[in-house]
Amino acid sequence: MLLGLALTLGACGKDEVEDPGLQPGAQGAVDFKAPESVRLKLSVKAGQRYRFVCEPATLTGCLLQLRDAQSMEPVGEPRGTDIRLKWWVSLFWTASADGPVVMELQSNIGVSEGEAGQFKYQFTEATDDVGGSVDEAVNQPVTETGTSFEGFLEFPTDVDAWRLSVPADHILRVRCMATESGTDPDTEIIRPDGTSLGTYNYNDYTINDGLPFMGIKNVGGGDLILLVRPAGPWFYAPRYACRVSDAGLDDHGDVAEQATVVTVPERVDVTFGSRNDVDVLAADLIAGHVYLFKDATFISVDIPIYCGTTVTDAQGVQQGPKLATNGEGARFTAPTSGRYFLALERTLGKHSNWIYPVSHQYEITDVTP
């Protein structure tokens, strides 16, 4: 089936492109047989930005190359489906002159010679869908159950700004992912005055971060601005989707004055709302007694992320280095009787596996001989 004008070319690629050209708003499907390519003639106006989308309907990849309608020389870099199995691919460009251009479509992944299939396409005018500054930020609702929205990065230096709001001291969770071929976008949360509160790329989740979201505690309240940028100039995905949610109040305070008081023995649920979250517990300990501090989230797994523990006394004096509480845990002997504060931080262990807990179970027990 052929919707819109197309010419299937052989390997030599010498056939002429026929009139008329497709107008913005055109969409349809074209048949394909490997290793041939399909060329569509597009009608464009100087200075206007355009978007062409290719989706393999019955194939496993699409490669787009814009070409000059007269010389058939390539214009700009090609864009193609990558190995991440997201078949949609978009190409944005700004027309340099009135008149036709040619878009060439090829299959680029796992197609044998003679294999037949079909491409779906869309050809539209494009504008920057979201401004890149605080003043231009587009409001998006944030709920406890989570809301989603979509955006486009129309060029390699594009920035999309979204305005989000959660109550004071609540934790905002954000995850933005590519929804077509290319890398996940870089994200950053800033305050309206430009102060950066953190950066994140979802690709880091399975490599070295272990958090499937960016979490930011909205200390003091007020709007927060989410900035979305291409991760790089060549392989970024123009289309992305974000999911945002209000994760509620932090489960434990960040400083001694806001500490959660526990008794010994105790097992406490600890959830790190963000990469840099600190949860502080307070316990009354007895001089000369030995206490075991242990991340007991898993019994037999030395988890790669655990609750590293820094102990201070009632006067704020740190009691030795930060303790590694993974594995068998860490022992601490109280030098004097009184209240001690345990600052728990998300800490990377020595072992790597695919278990990256967000919530932990933290144990405090008296193991005095």
Image (spheres, grey):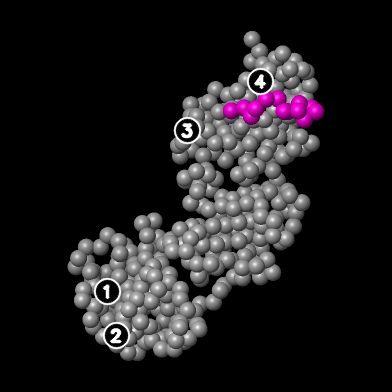
Which quadrant of the rendered structure holds the C terminus?
A: top right
Callout 3 secondary element:
loop
Q: Amino acid at mark 3?
A: His
Which quadrant of the rendered structure holds the N terminus?
A: bottom left
Q: Amino acid at mark 1?
A: Ser
Question: Residue at the spot x=48%, y=66% of the render?
Answer: 238
Q: CA distance from mark 1 to mark 4?
A: 70 Å
Which of disc 3 and disc 4 is earlier in sequence? 4
Q: Which residue is mark 2?
A: 17
- Label 1 CA crowd tier, 10 Å (few <14, some 14–19, many 20+): some
Q: Is residue 8 above or below residue 108?
A: below
Q: Which residue is mark 1?
A: 37
| 38 displayed left or right of 326 | left
Q: Which residues are magenta?
A: 312-324
Q: Which residue is mark 4?
A: 332
Q: CA distance from mark 2 to mark 3?
A: 59 Å
Residue 214 in percent (x, y) is at: 59, 50
Residue 36 in percent (x, y) is at: 24, 72
